[in-house]
Amino acid sequence: MNNTQTKGTTIETEHLTQQSVALDTMRRPRERRFEASRERASSSATPSTSGRTCVVQRDTRAEDDDAANDAAVELTARVRNLCARDASCSYVGDGRGSNDASGADGGDGDASTTTSEALDAYPPYWAKVFAAKRALEDDALKCARVIWVDSDATFHVTRSSCEGKRCATTVRSVHEIAEELFDGKDFFYSRDPSMTPPNDYWGSEFNAGFWGCANTTRGREIMDAWTKAYPVEAWSRGPNGQWTSTGNFAGSTYEQGAFVDSGLLKKYKAMGAINEVDACAINTPCESLGEASIRGAQACHFVGVYKQTYLPSYYADAMEDRAGVGTHESPYESLNATMSAVSEPFKSKCEYDLASTGRARTKPSVAPERDRDENAASRAYTAYGIASILALTGVLTLIGTVAARRRRRTASAEDETTPLV
């Protein structure tokens, strides 16, 4: 091969190499975009087991000048502090003083403003739904999940259990509690606390005081459908800023009742998207720090009259507890004494067992009248369904009989008019 041919081959090879590099350079951004899109699709399809937990909350009790609500105001500060000591928790709050992932003040900037606007633009009962939805949608917050915490509720981070007489109390992070509550689902909730007697206000299938939603396709779908259930015509705001509704408290015009009455709970639970947590774990008040730890509570919700009854003592215990995250040895005698001292209605409504895995459970005998009502309703619905099927079968049989008779008459008439051959 002469020099001219060699040079030509070299030039051609270099040209092809340059073309290949150019094509590869052009292809890479497309591939990177495709890979990023595929990762986003994958991460939005199922709940994330990592990422930031955003706590959305608003304290309206501080605005009513009622001294009886001071403890609830302090609970809000406790929720903020528990989130602040967890590097993967962001306290969105009411948007006026959000925390970044490490819990430092500020850092969320304009992202928190949208949450604050959501809280101010709707009745306080519905504001939580819109605020949680916007927090999920806000890219700046980077929420893998949101948890709403009423201002009379708090995370309960300690759990006690024993093997024989060797006992330990584990202090968990907000992230660990969140992972347990979601349990791989898109949404978690509980019923009304079992210790409240069913009446016009209590006994709901869904309690809106403490719940969470994952930043997944289905999670965002649930929140979108929930906000669309807001009956704007049923709410009005007076000159003093107070909201009033045409419906009953916690009924279909409220966020709690609407989640059930709109069919959202039934629909997404049937799809396997919702995790129902025992009410003894998250939406029941706590008698004391020790009682809640033995019960396996993950949150304490001091609903209604229980704010005055149990919140002061629980908060006093919580403020004295300085244990850091991790597992610490606990004296068996002390835990056993605490369990023996559990009073009513806690003792008869929730299960206590130092040898258990620490999962809170409602006793089977809880609210028998509520169970009877639900069973009766279920039986009535089943009977109605059977009756409807039988009625429909009867109608179809009658239609078939009439049609057969008509066919026979038509055939007979045709036979009479057919000429004989």
Image (cartoon, helix red, strand yellow):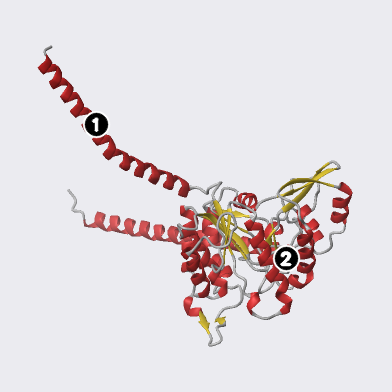
Q: Nearer the viewer, residue 346 or 26?
A: 26
* Residue 290 at x, y percent in the picture: 80, 56
Nearer the N terminus, badge 1 or badge 2?
Answer: 1
State which mark lies toward you, 1 or 2: 1
Crowdedness near tag 2: few (<14), some (14–19) or many (≥20) residues, C-alpha within 10 Å: few
Q: Secondary structure at mark 1?
A: helix
Is residue 402 visible to the viewer in this orientation of the structure?
yes
Q: CA distance from mark 1 to mark 2?
A: 76 Å
Q: Which residue is mark 2?
A: 369
Percent x, y of residue 32: 36, 42
Task: Kindly give the residue lying farthest to the bottom in the view shown.
Answer: 239
Residue 125 image point, x, y percent: 57, 72
Image location of residue 287, percent across then percent down:
79, 63
The numbered disc on residue 20 is 1
Mark number for residue 345?
none
Residue at x 32%, y 42% (from the top left corner): 29
